[in-house]
Image (cartoon, grey):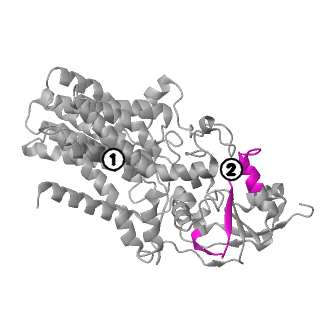
């Protein structure tokens, strides 16, 4: 068995085992749309249902199809097997981090052979990466696509072949197509590659051709679907540009965690070194990796200038990818879940800086390795990953109480996240719509008008699906309906907090 194959199998096995030990994923997005969206696509409900998972109903469901198919089909009664498979992308990501660290550090010999492994463990144990092991957030597969594309395009003894460059571009283009947040990191990757291809335009053109082809192939059909339905290929995002009559002409962005000013942006990663909440993500977390990597930039630049690095251009390429990616991520997203690639680069920079400084200061064999091992131990002890909610395994992956509804029912999802139960309802000919905060924000626009028309003209039975009965009772009268709170039924399941999803009959308000 080759060394690379052994490394890959080791990382995949570790990813599978860790995922099983962590428990079954039950994150908020899974309860809202990661299950509903592939169900809607595979069962012809796109354009028939009207955003029961809110605006997230319009997100590209491609990455969610394998999990949905396995969880509701072949592996529905094997939750641990499904969890093991869900951990494989993490194992792949750690392997790619290992290969990138090996490339950047110049294949150190002797005791130094442990350094790439220490870098991979440091990146894989970072707060965002570790928190998403085995989850449906899809940021780990996205990071794997980005790092895989970068590795395929990086030169070894010579430039990559045209086929390799096309493949690398395809991976990068696929990442952006499947989840547009990946686009934030592509300028940094491009800068890293340009550092390794001085004055060469042909490789970059080939890479871009592969990226464009993959992007069109994977994003095109979904964009066309959204444009056909809502006159905006990324609906409802960027509606200030596309001006669809379905939604207000605004740019929908999650700006809750943006630092706001340059001074706050520079201090932002250092504030993560102490336990915090609602700073870069909702749950509490703590991680010093990005801050330490920022402190390593100056020493690495000086070491490269004075030729103290084994592979100065390669370290500078990683430094460029990290610095540019962080500089773009902070003012645009600043959401921890999207920072997995930055965590991988940060680990390599920390290892390179500590090895160089330890060797220069102590001049002892093994000093660099000891310094990196000590730093890794401290980071593992210090880091606190966000908790996205996991549940114990049951007999089935989704143990949802069977609910039988009369034919032709209209199911009105009020509040989010409740759409995950829709695939499990026995409701022949039903239609589902969503009255969530973002759809209610479209008042006076076509989306709100269509939601209201659907409710007011429906002649069959109607039900409110909600996690907050009081909120449903507050919203329903505005649409000419009343919720029969006395007849509400709690849908027992193993995923939602306390099993709290209510199904309540609705009737027309007198004169409504």
> What residue sits 46% from the left and 78% below the top?
395
Q: Residue 220's spot in the image, x, y percent?
A: 47, 49
N-terminal label among 1 and 2 = 1
Residue 451 to residue 428: above or below: above
Mark 1 or 2, closer to the camera:
1
Highlighted range, magenta: 423-452
Residue located beneath label 1 in the image: 170
Residue 421 left/right relative to 155: right
> What residue sits 46% from the left and 49% below the top?
219
| Nearer to the camera, 214 or 70 | 214
How many residues crowd around disc 1 within 10 Å: few (fewer than 14), some, or many (20 or more)?
Answer: many
For marks 1 and 2, give the CA distance: 35 Å
How many residues crowd around disc 2 within 10 Å: few (fewer than 14), some, or many (20 or more)?
Answer: many
Is residue 442 rendered magenta in the image? yes
> What residue sits 64% from the left and 62% below the top?
48
Residue 352 to residue 59: above or below: above
| Nearer to the camera, 191 or 42 | 42
Residue 339 left/right relative to 304: right
The answer to whether mark 1 and mark 2 are in CB contact below 8 A is no
The quarter of the image holding the N terminus is: bottom left
Residue located beneath label 2 in the image: 439
Residue 31 left/right relative to 100: right
């Amino acid at each position: 068995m080759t060394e690379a194959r052994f490394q890959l199998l080791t990382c995949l096995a570790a990813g599978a085992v860790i995922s099983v030990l962590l428990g079954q994923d039950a994150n908020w997005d899974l309860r809202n749309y990661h299950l509903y969206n592939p169900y809607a696509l595979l069962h012809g409900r796109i354009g028939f249902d009207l955003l029961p998972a809110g605006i997230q109903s319009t997100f590209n469901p491609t990455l969610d199809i394998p999990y949905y198919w396995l969880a509701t089909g072949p592996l529905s009664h094997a939750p641990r097997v499904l969890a093991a498979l869900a951990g494989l992308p993490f194992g792949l990501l750690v392997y790619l981090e290992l290969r990138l660290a090996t490339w950047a550090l110049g294949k150190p010999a002797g005791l130094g052979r442990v350094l790439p492994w220490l870098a991979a463990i440091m990146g894989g144990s970072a707060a965002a990466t570790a928190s998403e092991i085995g989850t449906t957030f899809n940021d780990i597969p996205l990071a794997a696509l980005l790092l895989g594309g970068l590795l395929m395009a990086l030169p070894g003894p010579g430039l990559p072949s045209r086929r390799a460059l096309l493949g690398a571009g395809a991976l990068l283009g696929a990442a952006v197509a499947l989840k547009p947040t990946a686009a934030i990191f592509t300028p940094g990757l491009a800068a890293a590659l340009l550092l390794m291809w001085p004055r060469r335009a042909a490789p970059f053109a080939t890479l871009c051709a592969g990226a464009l082809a993959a992007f069109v192939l994977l994003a095109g059909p979904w964009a066309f679907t959204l444009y056909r339905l809502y006159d905006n290929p990324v609906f409802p995002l960027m509606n200030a540009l596309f001006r669809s009559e379905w939604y207000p002409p605004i740019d929908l962005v999650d700006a809750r965690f943006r630092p706001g000013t340059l001074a706050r942006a520079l201090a932002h990663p250092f504030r993560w070194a102490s336990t915090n909440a609602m700073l870069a993500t909702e749950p509490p977390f703590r991680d010093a990796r990005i801050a330490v990597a920022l402190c390593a930039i100056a020493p690495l630049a000086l070491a490269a200038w004075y030729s103290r690095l084994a592979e100065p251009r390669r370290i500078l390429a990683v430094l460029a990818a990290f610095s540019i990616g962080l500089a773009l991520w902070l003012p645009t997203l600043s959401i921890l879940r999207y920072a997995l690639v930055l965590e991988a680069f940060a680990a390599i920079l920390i290892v390179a800086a500590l090895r160089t400084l330890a060797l220069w200061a102590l001049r002892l064999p093994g000093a660099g390795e000891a310094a990196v091992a000590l730093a890794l131990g401290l980071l593992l002890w210090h880091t606190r990953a966000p908790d996205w909610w996991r549940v114990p395994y049951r007999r089935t992956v989704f143990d949802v109480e069977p609910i039988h509804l009369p034919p032709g029912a209209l199911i009105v999802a009020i509040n989010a996240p409740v759409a995950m139960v829709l695939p499990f309802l026995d409701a022949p000919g039903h239609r589902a719509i969503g009255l969530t905060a973002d759809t209610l924000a479209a008042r006076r626009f076509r989306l709100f008008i269509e939601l209201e028309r659907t409710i007011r003209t429906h002649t069959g039975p109607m039900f409110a699906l909600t996690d907050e009965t009081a909120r449903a009772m507050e919203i329903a009268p505005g649409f000419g309906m009343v919720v029969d709170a006395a007849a509400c039924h709690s849908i027992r399941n193993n995923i939602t907090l306390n099993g709290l999803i209510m199904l309540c009959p609705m009737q027309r308000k007198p004169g409504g």
